[in-house]
Image: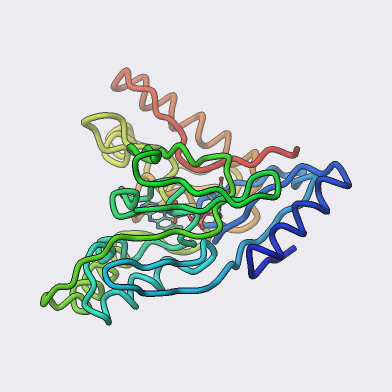
Amino acid sequence: MCVCSAEELKKSLEFAHKKKLPVFIFGGGSNLLFSDAGFRGLVIKNEISGMKFEKNLMQVGSGVPLAMIVMECARRNLKNLENFAGIPGTVGGAVVGNANGIGEAVSRVKILENGEVKIFKKKNLKFSYRYSNLRGKILTKIEFNLKKTDEDLQRKVAELAHEKFAKHPFEKTAGSWFKNPEGEQAWKLIDTAGCRGLKIGDAVVSEKHANFFQNAGKATAIDFLELEKMVAEKVFAKFGIRLEREVVAVPEN
Ligand SMILES: Cc1cc2nc3c(=O)[nH]c(=O)nc-3n(C[C@H](O)[C@H](O)[C@H](O)COP(=O)(O)OP(=O)(O)OC[C@H]3O[C@@H](n4cnc5c(N)ncnc54)[C@H](O)[C@@H]3O)c2cc1C
């Protein structure tokens, strides 16, 4: 089911509640691994839209693509979001997972809980590496704090996006598989442990970026989880470091 407004989201949640269905909120799907059995419940594809600028603030629907607000802010010479160029997915997904520290720029978040809209102000928001205290809540609107600038942001955004496209594989991947352990880079550990190009079924450790797993054909979720286990074991054997999954594995129910 796809929702384009907070009202539609509310109705879908009421429907799921009535039918006793578990709910999964799907943003851009760029960080997900679904179980091979699928998801026994209601998947809500979030396309809540809207973008409003007022002085140094921008309010945006949680289903808006992150790339769209990055470009729009750059076009208006508004600073603070340019570093998120080249990250796929929605604004809601980015804020929940604090993608590249985007939480820094957030001033307020609206969530929908038990049919009511609640507001999280900056002082109640907690963000750290790939973490926010919003996980498990349903975001409908996000407010960002921006700054007027004379910098050529459009150029910066284009350069950053270009760098990412050159560095990351963009086909059939959920992005970085593992979090970076403190003081380390997961891709370097994986590469040095000899895992680049490792394959189980059609799940492959990318040749382009060793922390990206790719689906080379008909990989199953099980293939990916076995590949994850093999890579984590090799890294642990070589460095004594336990890698932790970054990708969100969605259970069957
Ligand atoms: C090629 C590539 C490059 C990437 N580069 C980066 C990078 O540089 N830095 C980085 O941090 N990540 C990166 N990622 C990972 C991913 O793009 C980000 O984590 C992105 O922010 C996820 O957003 P999404 O909308 O796709 O979320 P999804 O994958 O759809 O969902 C991720 C999680 O967020 C939850 N969620 C989504 N929307 C909402 C909402 N409105 N309310 C509540 N929960 C919600 C979902 O339920 C799920 O638990 C990359 C991925 C790819 C494929």
Q: Extreme left residue here?
A: 150
- Say left or right for 202 vs 53: right
Percent across and percent down for residue 199 are: 51, 43
Q: Extreme right residue here?
A: 19
Percent across and percent down for residue 110 are: 51, 53
Q: Residue at x 64, y 70 (%)?
A: 4
Classify the position of the C terminus by image quarter.
top right
Work out whether residue 26 or residue 79 is closer to the camera in this orientation and state it.
79
Q: Quadrant of residue 248?
A: top right
Work out whether residue 166 or residue 144 is closer to the camera in this orientation and state it.
144
Classify the position of the N terminus by image quarter.
bottom right
Establish if 2 lies above or below 75: above
Establish if 177 lies above or below 173: above
- Say left or right for 175 vs 135: left
Establish if 1 lies above or below 242: below
- Say left or right for 202 vs 197: right
Percent across and percent down for residue 59 are: 42, 66
Work out whether residue 131 or residue 225 is closer to the camera in this orientation and state it.
131
Q: How is the image coloured?
A: rainbow
Percent across and percent down for residue 58 are: 36, 68
Q: Residue at x 37, y 21 (%)?
A: 236
Q: Extreme bottom residue here?
A: 75
Q: Residue at x 19, y 78 (%)?
A: 155
